[in-house]
Image (tube, rainbow, N blue to C red):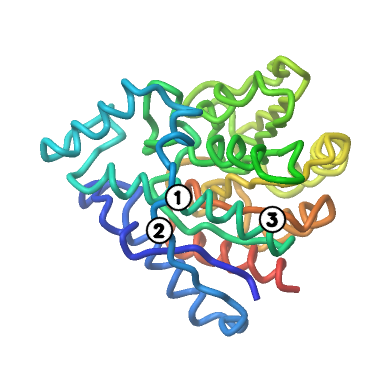
């Protein structure tokens, strides 16, 4: 059985009819998983707000920023920037999303097997004092900081295979010697960060900027020569995947040419590092290829 942590409440973060980060993303994935050949092997879990949640969010975000988010939502909604809308329910939904990621950490550590957090809004662009790029709270970074406080966890690695660099995640974790961050991302592309020269305060950052048009023939050698050696040397007690699926050929927001089955291969590589993997949804905006990629990821975990 593979736990998938999901709630219909994640659909209540409303971004507008034409916004790419829309509730239909989750609906498409849920429908695909429920009709998959392995559907009976999925354990659906509903997240609840975690006790002490705000203290964990405050490990990554300033109180001023948190209050700003709450105020915008309470006043009826608005925008953090031109790409990042907030609806009346967005703050509460974002809190639940963080809780889902933290519950995912608990589940993975208890079972010593993978789990998938199917939540929104995404998080890897959210910096300590600013949300951006569709992201409100830095889910992966908060989950990593939380995991380090759990018994038996001394090192956490975050692998970000979203097509965009996780500027928020990196900014929050790059000073922590117990957290490693690796990102594969199109460059140049939004948000314009993630240079290969950035190594982190403890040589704990590996950025792999890739040119537009890159496909599996570009990605695969990097896994074998750089990514897997980086992760294996770090020896994480938990691996968190910022699982964005916008590096797909069909995705409207980028120009990388991966196929859904490629994410199954990436998952296999990760399982060779550890089975204690938490996958958490980030980007991915073509509904068909997005859902097929999540299916490929989970299928490989079950295989």
**Rendering quarter of residue 232:** top right
Taking 288 as reference, is 144 left or right?
right
Q: Position of residue 302 (x, y in %)?
A: 71, 72
- Marks 2/1: CA distance? 7 Å
Crowding near the residue tagged with mark 2, few <14, some 14–19, many ≥20 C-alpha atoms within 10 Å:
few
Mark earlier in primary sequence (3, 1):
1
Identify the residue shown where x is 26% and y is 56%. Answer: 12
Residue at which label 3 appears: 109
Taking 218 as reference, is 144 left or right?
left
Q: Are marks 2 and 1 in contact (CB under 8 Å)?
A: yes
Residue at which label 1 appears: 99
- Marks 2/3: CA distance? 18 Å
Q: Position of residue 8 (x, y in %)?
A: 33, 65
Residue positioned most to the left: 75
Mark earlier in primary sequence (2, 1):
2
**Rendering quarter of residue 237:** top right
Q: Is residue 85 above or below residue 190?
A: below
Element on which disc 2 rests: loop
Residue at which label 2 appears: 48
> Could you tell me how many numbered marks the image carries?
3
Crowding near the residue tagged with mark 3, few <14, some 14–19, many ≥20 C-alpha atoms within 10 Å:
many
Q: In terms of depth relative to the viewer, which is nearer, 240 or 218? A: 240
Q: Quick one: quadrant of the N terminus?
A: bottom right
Q: Is residue 183 above or below residue 223?
A: above
Identify the residue shown where x is 55% and y is 51%. Answer: 280
Identify the residue shown where x is 52% and y is 47%. Answer: 246
Mark earlier in primary sequence (2, 3):
2
Crowding near the residue tagged with mark 1, few <14, some 14–19, many ≥20 C-alpha atoms within 10 Å:
many
Q: Position of residue 137 (x, y in %)?
A: 41, 36
């Amino acid at each position: 059985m593979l736990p998938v942590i999901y709630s219909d409440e994640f659909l209540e973060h409303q971004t507008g009819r034409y916004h790419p980060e829309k509730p239909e993303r989750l609906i498409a994935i849920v429908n695909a998983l429920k009709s998959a050949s392995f559907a009976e092997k999925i354990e659906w879990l509903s997240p609840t707000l975690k006790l002490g949640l705000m203290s964990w969010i405050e490990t990554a975000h300033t109180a001023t920023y948190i209050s700003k988010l709450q105020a915008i939502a309470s006043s009826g909604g608005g925008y953090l920037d031109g790409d990042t809308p907030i609806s009346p329910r967005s703050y509460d939904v974002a809190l639940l999303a963080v809780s889902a990621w933290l519950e995912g950490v608990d589940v993975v550590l208890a079972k010593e097997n993978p789990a998938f957090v199917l939540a929104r809004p995404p998080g890897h662009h959210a910096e300590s004092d600013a949300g951006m790029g569709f992201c409100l709270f830095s889910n992966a970074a908060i989950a990593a900081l939380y995991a380090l406080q759990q018994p038996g966890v001394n090192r956490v690695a975050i692998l970000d295979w979203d097509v965009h660099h996780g500027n928020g995640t990196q900014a929050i974790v790059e000073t922590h010697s117990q957290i490693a961050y690796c990102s594969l991302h199109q460059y140049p592309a939004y948000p314009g960060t993630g240079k290969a020269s950035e190594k982190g305060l403890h040589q704990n950052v590996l950025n792999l900027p890739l040119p537009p048009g890159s496909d599996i023939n570009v990605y695969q050698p990097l896994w074998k020569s750089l990514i897997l050696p980086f992760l294996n040397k770090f020896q994480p007690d938990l691996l968190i995947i910022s699982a964005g699926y916008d590096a797909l050929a069909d995705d409207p927001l980028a120009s990388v040419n991966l196929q859904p089955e490629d994410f199954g291969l990436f998952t296999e590589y990760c399982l060779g590092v550890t089975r204690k993997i938490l996958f958490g949804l980030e980007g991915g905006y073509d509904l068909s290829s997005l859902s097929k990629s999540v299916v490929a990821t989970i299928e490989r975990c079950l295989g």
